[in-house]
């Protein structure tokens, strides 16, 4: 059963978010890779970094993936660090677990999935361009009986208040 589909954000959205988040003048849009599973038995879809990033211990960065995801209502995409980066560098997501809601696809930024990471280890960490650094897992979620919220999403990090 397929409940989601990954696609690239537009070149303009990617370049705007890249410029806002890091000092990089290269044309990296063609480096954006659609997430995929490493094996048929893998639960997680690996996300690839479109640029090389080096973080010293304690440093953090937001990485624009160039990816958006259409997700059926009733499901959520949860983002986690790949275990290799967690074990080697104690890399964590700044918000512990990334939550990509189904309505994020329609956000003002085209639903661009931007991943905020931190190097909590004691040595420098480098993520190379094209390297898998986080993974996303689709999970079914349920609503409480008293749910009456009809608000509409507009942005990403912290946009719902």
Image: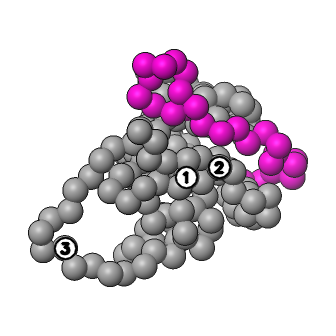
Give residue 126's position: percent from left, percent from top. Answer: 65, 29
In the image, is 131 to the left or to the right of 143?
A: right
Asked if disc 2 and disc 3 are in contact, CB closer than 8 Å, the reply is no
Q: Earlier in the sequence, mark 2 or mark 1?
A: 2
Q: CA distance from mark 2 to mark 3?
A: 31 Å
The residue at which mark 3 appears reads as 147
Are the residues tagged 1 and 3 within 8 Å (C-beta)? no
* Real-space Cα separation, disc 1 to disc 3, in angstroms: 25 Å
Tell me residue 74's x, y (percent): 32, 56
**Between residues 147 and 160, which one lies in front from this camera angle?**
147
- Image coordinates of residue 152 in percent, x first then y, are 42, 79
Per the model, the C-alpha gap separating discs 2 and 1 is 6 Å
* Sequence-first tag of 1 and 3: 1
| Label 2 crowd bin: few (<14), some (14–19), many (20+), radius 10 Å | some
**SS class, disc 1:** strand
- Residue at image location 43% in from the left, 60% down from the top: 102
- Which comes before the other along the chain, label 2 or label 3? 2
Q: Position of residue 55 (x, y in %)?
A: 62, 37
Residue under circle 1?
69
Q: Which residue is mark 2?
A: 7
Residue depicted at x 38% and y 51%: 76
Disc 3 is placed on an element classified as loop
Q: Is residue 95 visible?
A: no
């Amino acid at each position: 059963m397929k409940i989601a589909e990954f696609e690239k954000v537009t070149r303009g959205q990617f370049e705007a978010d890249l410029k806002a988040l890091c000092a990089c003048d290269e044309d990296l849009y063609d480096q954006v890779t659609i997430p995929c599973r490493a094996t048929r038995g893998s639960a997680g879809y690996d996300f690839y970094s479109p640029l090389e990033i080096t973080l010293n211990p304690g440093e953090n960065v937001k990485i624009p993936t160039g990816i958006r995801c259409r997700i059926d209502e009733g499901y959520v995409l949860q983002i986690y660090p790949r275990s290799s980066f967690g074990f080697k560098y104690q890399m964590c997501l700044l918000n512990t677990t990334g939550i990509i809601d189904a309505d994020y696809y329609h956000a003002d930024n085209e639903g661009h999935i931007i991943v905020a990471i931190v190097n909590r280890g004691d040595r420098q960490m480098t993520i190379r361009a094209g390297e898998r650094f986080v993974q996303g897992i689709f999970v079914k979620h349920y609503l409480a009986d008293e749910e009456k919220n009809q608000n509409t999403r507009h942005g990403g990090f912290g946009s719902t208040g």
